[in-house]
Image (cartoon, helix red, strand yellow):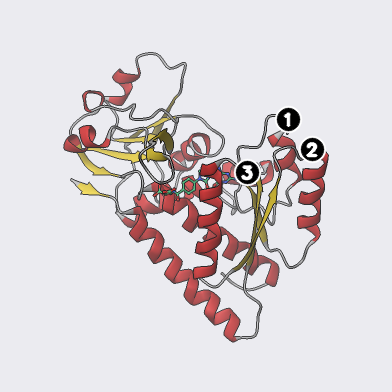
Amino acid sequence: MTIIDGKKVASEIKNELKQKVAAAVSKGLRPPHLTAVLVGNDPASWAYVKSKESASHKIGFTSSLLHFDEHISEAELLSVVHELNRDTNVDAYIVQLPLPKHIDEQKVILAVNPLKDVDGFHPLNLGKMLAGLPAFLPATPYGILELIKRYQIPTQGKHVLIIGRSLIVGRPLSILLGQKRQGGNATVTVAHSKTQNLKQLSLQADIIITAMGKPLFLKSDMVKNGVVIIDAGINSIDAPQTQRGYRLVGDVDFENVRQKASYITPVPGGVGPMTIAMLLQNTWKAYTLQQGLSE
Ligand code: L34
């Protein structure tokens, strides 16, 4: 059984980027700039955005964090987005989700300039991905593809079960893994909250990717021997005795399932760090496109 070390792969990717940034800067170019927009004070969102910022700085990007009160109106937030679209010093930005209920997330995503959309959530990027054209891929699916690639896990002809159909993880992954290309060619099943007989499906799967946000949901009696487990679940559960008051667990009961798995990602230290690394990778791509450089 191999534990997939997302932290290590993420740091390899960040080192590759760091060298590219240094080379660009040594030619007299300004470094790439990533902006994160954060609305409200959700502690997990704060933590993610902060790690995006610090990872940016470590590889030589500049970054900014625009933080707004949770009561910001939709119109005000849209005008922030329009300003970021215009700002030629900002190569790339993200609007951290979730947004407060009074703001229509789709409306905000639609307002993002697709060339700066390093989350890959804009329908133009999602559509390009569907068509197999170059596009910004959403960072979590992109990170999962990269883990599968760097651990040389075969996907061709394999039965992949994705549990969760979110627009940021499950849905794009289902498309990417089924595509006719290296790292694709899988037979993909997408399960979700209305799926019947999930266990019957999961017992057949060669690779199971969980992305539904149910802490410790997947148990060992639901998987076959030798299964590959990729856990994209990030659930905060209360842990009053810890410093930050919560702890992170995945959708997989790791200790229970690891016995049967050939490969498994931990939480934390699996998919999460890859999300950040691939966001930086996308930012590099946005920068090179806008500066007219080759990647
Ligand atoms: N717009 N919103 C937008 N883009 C995204 O790509 C995200 N996501 C998800 C939430 N909202 C978003 C993230 O960034 C989830 N997510 C994310 C990013 C990083 C990590 C987890 C989720 C991460 O770094 N996880 C670490 C542990 C971090 C900790 O200990 O607090 C890990 O090892 O899993």
- Image position, residue 263 (x, y; %): 25, 44
Residue at (73%, 41%) from the top-left corner?
Answer: 108
Residue at (61%, 54%) from the top-left corner?
Answer: 118
- Closer mark to the observer between disc 1 and disc 3: 1
Residue 198 position by quadrant: top left
- Image position, residue 71 (x, y; %): 74, 37
Q: Which numbered disc, 2 or 3, marks the residue that appears first in the sequence? A: 2
Dots 1, 2 in contact, CB < 8 A: yes
Between the C-alphas of marks 1 and 2, the distance is 8 Å
- Closer mark to the observer between disc 2 and disc 3: 2
Q: Residue furthest top?
A: 196
What's the residue type where badge 3 is placed?
Phe
Q: Which numbered disc, 1 or 2, marks the residue that appears first in the sequence? A: 2
Secondary structure of residue under mark 2? loop
The answer to whether residue 142 is above or below residue 258 is below
Give the residue number, with chain letter if any, for mark 3: 121
Give the residue number, with chain letter if any, for mark 2: 73
Q: Is residue 228 left or right of residue 20?
A: left
Give the residue number, with chain letter if any, for mark 1: 102
The answer to whether residue 263 is above or below residue 59 is above
